[in-house]
Each structure stands twice: as C-alpha cells, then as structure tokens.
Amino acid sequence: EAGVAQSPRYKIIEKRQSVAFWCNPISGHATLYWYQQILGQGPKLLIQFQNNGVVDDSQLPKDRFSAERLKGVDSTLKIQPAKLEDSAVYLCASSTGTPTPLYNEQFFGPGTRLTVL
Amino acid sequence: EDQVTQSPEALRLQEGESSSLNCSYTVSGLRGLFWYRQDPGKGPEFLFTLYSAGEEKEKERLKATLTKKESFLHITAPKPEDSATYLCAVQAARAAGNKLTFGGGTRVLVKP
C-alpha cells in the first residue's frame, strides 16, 4: 500500500515570497490533515479536511496561509507571504475517516522542510 | 486548552538499559492517547492508542500504560534501532474531527 506522498521535500525561500506544498493521501482516505512541526517541537494541526470540506482550521493563520482539497483527494497548502517564523516541517497526514472506530489512526507523509531566509 | 508535556526532553541509554518516558496531559474528556515514533527526516509512525486508565499495550520492546493524568512508554532492553523521537498526543472528546494535540517529544539515543 502506497503511503502519503508529499512534494517538494525541501524548499528554501526569501521572506515575503510565496510557497506551495502538495499532498496526496493514501488511496480511499477521506480525512486529510496538515500539521506544522517547528524544530524541537511536536506537530501542530493547521487544518483538517473531510473529503473536500474543512472540519477544523482554528489554528491556521488565515491572513497568510490557505489550503484546498478541491476534488476530495490531493491537497495544496500555500503560504503568502512567508515570514521567518514559518520555517518548519509541514506534515500531511490522512486517515480513513470512517465514523467507527472513532479513534482511527493517522498516517503521516515524510514532510516538506521549509526554510525562510 | 488541551496540554501535553513530555519528559525528559532527551534520553541517552546504553543498549540493554531499560527506561521510561513520561507524558503528562490535561484535557477536557480524553477520547484517546496516542504514541508515535519519529525518525529524523521522516513523518511520525503510529505505535499505540490507549483509551482508558489502566489500559496497557505492548509492541516488541515497547509497553505503553495510561492513568488519568499521564502515560508512560517503557522501553525494555533497548537496541540502537530504538533510537528515535517518541511523541505523545491526546484527542479530546470535544475535539473537532480527529484533532491531535502533541507534546514536544522525547529524543531517545541508544548506544551500543
């Protein structure tokens, strides 16, 4: 079974530039998550999609971050304009999304390491 | 607000030297507590889910336990391949969707 795919793996940009990350979840997984992991910290949820609808985006800095999952499959996370503090690893995860069992496992991709100079 | 604190931040062990990692949490109604392993340059890999106080789960040299305020990950007779960062996360009963709140992790280094 293929895992969660993310690209690019690494990205270096100047502050105030824009950047986009792509994620393709495990086939058939209805739920997709984007997390931000700053060096030395645990992942922090930015946004969760159920199919192509947003379930939770309470921690997404909406003035500069946006995300979409138009066809309910792959997803794009964009930052515009980037700030120095956005330097982090951006992780995508997916889960089956079925209502039972409630606590379904989240499968993570390898992440995209972003450096903002 | 849900909070997860892991200790110690880092742990250096000799091969075969057993130890425990701590995960303290505060959450309004626990739906589940999760343990993940993260290797450098990779995403977290699922290990265990614990649902209620008193529950225990084992996988090879790892054993996770849960109380009402904390969880422990016991590493018995570790090997160098057990070197990784171990992450603890909680899911609140009132959480939107399946939101996980993670702790900062414990970096474990096992020397041969």
Image (spheres, rainbow, N blue to C red):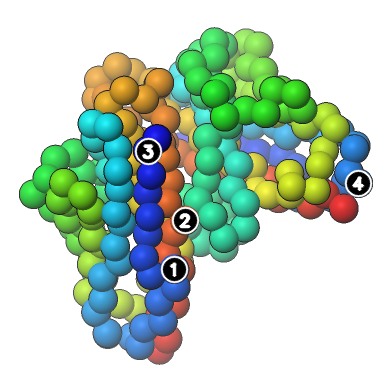
| Residue A43 falls left or right of residue B56 | right
Q: Of the two numbered discs 2 and 3 on the same chain, state the one appearing first in sequence.
A: 3
- Amino acid found under the numbered disc labelled 2: Gly
Q: Which label number is shown at residue B104?
A: 2
Q: Name which residue lies at 53% across and 41% down.
A: A44
Callout 4: few (<14), some (14-19), or many (20+) C-alpha neighbours within 10 Å? Answer: some
Q: Name which residue lies at 54% across and 14% down.
A: A54
Looking at the picture, how far across and down is residue A43, in whole percent? 52, 45
Callout 3: few (<14), some (14-19), or many (20+) C-alpha neighbours within 10 Å? Answer: some
- Amino acid found under the numbered disc labelled 3: Asp
Q: Nearer the viewer, residue A7 or A63?
A: A63
Q: CA distance from mark 2 to mark 3?
A: 14 Å
Please name the residue that numbered disc 4 is placed on: A14
- Secondary element type, mark 4: loop
Looking at the picture, how far across and down is residue B111, in whole percent? 42, 86
Q: CA distance from mark 3 to mark 1?
A: 19 Å
- Image depth: mark 3 or mark 1 in front: 3
Please name the residue that numbered disc 1 is placed on: B9
- Secondary element type, mark 2: loop
